[in-house]
Amino acid sequence: MQSKLHGASLLLFVSAGLLSACRKDAGATPGSSPAGPPSGPPVTVAPVLVRDIAETTEFTGRLGPVDDVEIRPRVSGQVDEVHFLSGQMVKRGDVLFTIDSRGFRATLAAAEAAVVQAAVRAENSDKEAARATQLLTTRAISAEESESRTARQAEAKAALLSAEATRDIAKLDIDYAQVVAPVAGRVSRALVTQGNIVSGAPGANTLLTTIVSVDPMYVYVDVDENSLLGLQKLMRANELPHDDKGRVLVEFGLADEEGFPRTGVVESLGNRLDIGTGSILMRVLVQNPDGLLIPGLFARVRIPTTAKHETTLVNQRAIGTDQSQKFVYVVGDDNKAQQRSVTLGPIVDGLRVVRTGLEAGELIIVNGLQRVRPGSPVTPELEKTAPASGGAPGEKSQAASR
C-alpha cells in the first residue's frame, strides 16, 4: 500500500513540473533570445553624399520665334493664286501669293515709252545747247537765247530722270505682284484666298498670312532680382559653364519631357527690372533642327546660380518637418536615431542640397520615418540601390561624384 502511495506522489510531482515548463514555454516568443536588449523597428538608411555640383534654379518660360513676320501686299489688286499649304515650311524668296499684274505691265509699257520720249528730248536739247555755245562766240545769237537753250537742256535731263523713275516704279509694282517669303520658316494658313481684292495702300495693307522662323528659337524667361544678381556676379567672374563663344549654358525641357534634356545659351538680358514684378526678361537661344519646338510652348528652364563647389546631398525622402523646422534622423554606432536639424538648399538631380547640419558619410534614415522616435533604437538596413543622378546633358559634369 505504501509503495502505491509513493508511486502516485512521484507521478504527481513530475506532472506538475511538466505543466510549469509548458507554461514558461508558452510565454516565450519564438525566435527571441531570452538575454539581450529588445530590437527597434526596421528602417532603411543611406549615407550622406558629397559631390561637386553647380546649384541651379528652375524657372518657367515660353518659346518664341526669332522672326515673326506678317505678310502684307505692297500693291493692290486681285489675288490670282495661292502657292502654299497651311503649315508648310517655306524658304526665303518662295512665292506665296500672285496678284493680277496685267495693269502693272500696261503701266510699265507706258512708262518705257515716256522714257524714250524724254530721252529724245534730252538728246535734242543737248544739241541745241552745244550749237548755242558756238553761235554765241560769233555773236549770231544773244546771250539770253543761249541761256534759254541751256535751261531747256537741264529741264530735258530732269524729265528723263523722272520718266526713268516712273518706269522703275512700274517694274517694282510688277515684282510686288508676286508676294514672296521674306524669311524662312513655317507659314500659317492663307487669310485671303484666290479671287479676293487686296489693298497695298500704306497703313491699310491687307494681312495675307504670317511666317515664324523655326531654327533657332528663343525661350523667354522672367528671372527674379536675387537670381539675377547672383547670375551677373558669376558671369563677371567667369565661373559658369559656357560654350565656345562665351555664352552661359542653360538647360530646359518641355511640359511632357522628363528632366531637362535640352540645352541653350543666354542670348540677352533686358535693360531694366520690372518694378511691378521684380523680375527681368532673359532670352535664351535654343536650336531646333528637327522643328519640333513651336512658338508658345511652355518650357521649364534650369539656370545655374552658383559656381561648381563641394555640396552635401541627401535623399528627399529622408527630410522630415516639425512645424517650420526641417530635420533628418541620423543613426549612430549604437543604432539609435538622433534627430538633426538641417538647412536645405535646392534639388539637384533628384537629391536635396543640405547646407548645414550633416557631414559626409553619416547614415540617415530614408524609409520608416513614421516608426522612429528621437533617441529610440532602430534596426538599420542599408539601402541597396543608390538614387540615380538623372542629370540632363551638361549637368553630368557639374554633378559628378568626387
Image (cartoon, grey):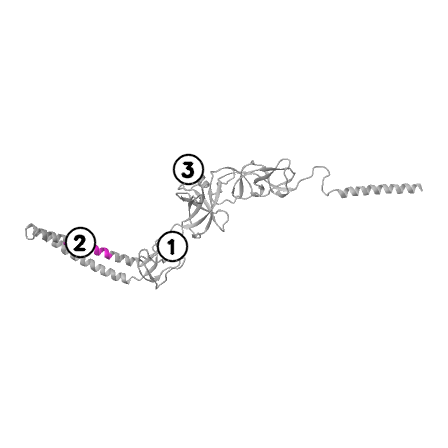
Q: Earlier in the sequence, mark 1 or mark 3?
A: 1
The residue where tag 2 is placed is 157
Q: CA distance from mark 1 to mark 2?
A: 44 Å
Pick whichever, 90 or 163, lies toward us.
Answer: 163
The residue where tag 3 is placed is 236
Q: Does residue 150 appear left or right of residue 252 in this picture?
A: left
Q: Quadrant of the N terminus?
A: top right
Does the magenta segment cover residue 192? no
Give the structural element (helix, strand or loop) at label 2.
helix
Q: In this picture, which residue range is highlighted in magenta?
A: 152-167
What numbered label is drawn on residue 384?
none
The residue where tag 1 is placed is 211
Q: Earlier in the sequence, mark 3 or mark 2?
A: 2
Q: CA distance from mark 1 to mark 3?
A: 38 Å
Q: Does residue 238 appear left or right of residue 134 in this picture?
A: right
Position in image of residue 143 (x %, y %): 9, 51
Position in image of residue 195 (x %, y %): 34, 64
Q: Residue at coordinates 25% horizontally, 56% vertically from top-left?
A: 168
Q: Residues within 10 Å of mark 3 (few under 14, many from 20)?
A: few
Q: Does residue 341 appear left or right of residue 208 in this picture?
A: right
Which amino acid, by three-letter code, is at mark 1? Ile
Q: Residue furthest right?
A: 1
Secondary structure mostly taken by the magenta-highlighted segment of the chain? helix
Position in image of residue 230 (x %, y %): 45, 39
Tell me, yes or no, if residue 368 can be seen here: no
Q: Residue at coordinates 23% horizontally, 61% vertically from top-left?
A: 109
Does the magenta segment cover residue 153? yes
Q: Residues within 10 Å of mark 1 (few under 14, many from 20)?
A: many
Q: Does residue 402 appear left or right of residue 78 in this picture?
A: right
Give the structural element (helix, strand or loop) at label 3.
helix
